Amino acid sequence: MTAATPLVALVGNPNAGKSALFNALTGARQKIANYPGVTVERKSGRVALPDGRPVELLDLPGAYSLLPDSLDEAVTRDVVRGSFAGQRRPDALVIVLDAGNLDNHLRFAIELIAEGLPVVVALNMVDLARRDGLELDAAVLSAELGVPVVETVAVRKRGLNDLLSALGDALRGAAMREAQPVADRKAITQRAHAIARKAIVKETQTRQWTRRLDNVLLHPVGGIVVLLALLFVMFQAVYAWSEAPIGWIEGGFAVLTEVINGYMPDNLLRAFLTEGIIAGVGAVVVFLPQILILFLFILLLEATGYMTRAAFVMDRMMAAVGLSGHSFIPLLSSFACAIPGIMATRTIMDQKERLATILIAPLMTCSARLPVYTLIIGAFIPARSVGPGIGLQGLVLFILYIAGIVGAMLAAAVIQRFVTGSRGGSFLIEMPRYQLPRLRDIALGLWQRAWLFLRRAGTIIFAATVILWVLLSFPKVPVGSTESQVEYSAAGRIASVIEPVVEPIGFNHDIALAIIPAMAAREVAVAALGTVYAVNAADEEEAAANLGPQLATNWSLATALAFLAWFVFAPQCISTIAVTRRETNGWKWPIFMVTYLFALAYAAAGITYWTARAFGL
């Protein structure tokens, strides 16, 4: 092609049908290479206008904005503005819009039109929009945007002749307009919504209700209120709905212990089964109903399409600490487990923002913390109401989860200010449709979570409990000694070395002993405490007693609250540290993460303990 051949760029959001339109227009007349100096694919082709003039067509990478969050978006911006080395600026743009997702796609179109190039808009996939009950007026859309708008169905090659005719007219009178200053993101979004509403001729009740719901759920204030209310209800349900099944599991373990004590002689094997396995692993397994209730809510919110909207609502809050809505999904995944959350940061293009997200992901209250929280709350917080339908225990659990979130946001602000320098990127995302959850999918998700939890209890927690029981049981305390078995044991002696370090923050010998094996997994702290009190029990009845009442007898409320504060921050999970090392390609950032989180945990526990003591708790 000669330099005189007009260059037209196809540009639009991902999934707008842009590549399908490019293929329909160019057919086999395509060239595929890379843009100079980058690994982004460059696709160009040739098409003839109705008057016979040749045009070079360039299929630019999909983008959401001219404020790039990825290399693809940066290439699109630079080509459109003529600043990409080795690539001349297009003479005109064909902006491809998805007719069924007009609100979101118009935001980018408004930015592109403001660049001053001749523009033709291809209103694509109108057939799918009509199938879903949405009728749009292309003439109204054209009048609002100030550029020609042509309806197309790229996959069926409909509207292509009209599009080429409009493009020929645009090139024929191709006078470059002066680029207009682009309004801020909020103003662009508002204008896009206003134009989309004007262009609607008819829509179904479902789409109307979707828009009304989004007006509430995506509101900068109302959306946050709804999100907090959902979280509050979720944590109330964790206690209110789990009481009966927890009682069944505890009863089952009590019967099993009685059977073992009744039929086996008093020997080392019986002690291993009752004091090690049942008291240790069983102390963790009883919390399975609460974990399943938590995941029931998470799976329901994901299946209905709400989670993406929650990410959008959180974007403004996260921008204040140098992050964006891109970080929300990995952090949300960390509520289940920090490991998949950290791995999910691979979708964040800004490497500084990705690193900041990795470093705060362990602060999200993962499901492994839930057994610790519910054990201490159940033992020390009265099961009473503080208002209509509001339980005090659920309220305290809600506060602990919020404390983790607030701690993560404050840590992110400090990290991006003094460590990574991340400022957060722009966050544009397409909203999924609201839909009813499929019961089969929810049931399958719960089964997978239950299996993962039980497998973890049968492997990591089991192994840690067995090792701890051995260390607690040997050497045997001499007859006539005033020391307890736990204090005299190998584990007790190790804990005695650590106790002076943690005593200033209110931790006792039992806690010093429990936090060591809890580095394998946070739930092991519960198993460790169960094993400690079972080994130290004076008789079988005391050994078989539930762990909660024993803690309430032996700990002060100040110590219990300090223990909770410790677990809000402490990075007690070897697997999380290992995956952080893998994702950051070295030990520098895992060491930094562990150091600052343990420092936070120590400070939070100490402040909590001495504040509680000051109030006489």
Image (cartoon, rainbow, N blue to C red):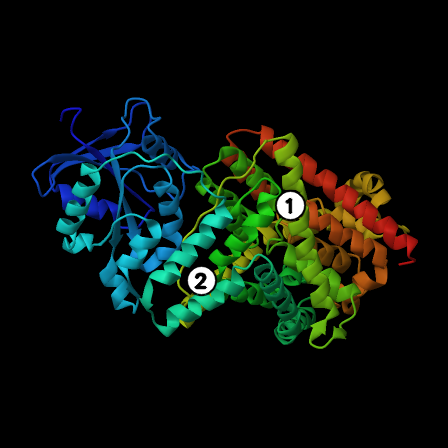
Relative side of 581 to 48, left or right: right
Residue 271 seen in render: no
Mark 2 neighbour density, 10 Å: few (under 14) some (14–19) many (20 or more): some
- Coordinates of residue 216 in the picture (x, y in percent): 53, 65
221 above or below 66?
below
- Coordinates of residue 75 in the picture (x, y in percent): 35, 32
Mark 1 neighbour density, 10 Å: few (under 14) some (14–19) many (20 or more): many
- Coordinates of residue 63 in the picture (x, y in percent): 36, 42
Q: Identify residue type, mark 2.
A: Gly
- In the foreground, 447 or 138: 138
- In the foreground, 77 or 23: 77
Counting the numbered discs, the total is 2
From the image, tell me which residue sits under label 2.
305
- Coordinates of residue 391 in the picture (x, y in percent): 72, 71
Please tell me which residue is depicted at 32% across the width and 29% down the height of the picture: 39
Residue 563 seen in render: yes
Please tell me which residue is depicted at 48% across the width and 63% down the height of the picture: 214
Q: Quadrant of residue 228?
A: bottom right
- In the foreground, 307 or 376: 307
Task: Report the disc number at residue 409.
Answer: 1
295 above or below 92?
below
Q: Secondary structure at mark 2?
A: loop
Q: Quadrant of the N terminus?
A: top left
Q: Secondary structure at mark 1?
A: helix
Q: How far is mark 1 from mark 2, CA to CA?
A: 25 Å
Q: Quadrant of residue 219?
A: bottom right
325 above or below 458?
above
557 above or below 25?
below
Q: Identify residue type, mark 1.
A: Met
Q: Residue furthest left?
A: 52
Q: Quadrant of the C terminus?
A: bottom right
Q: Earlier in the sequence, mark 1 or mark 2?
A: 2
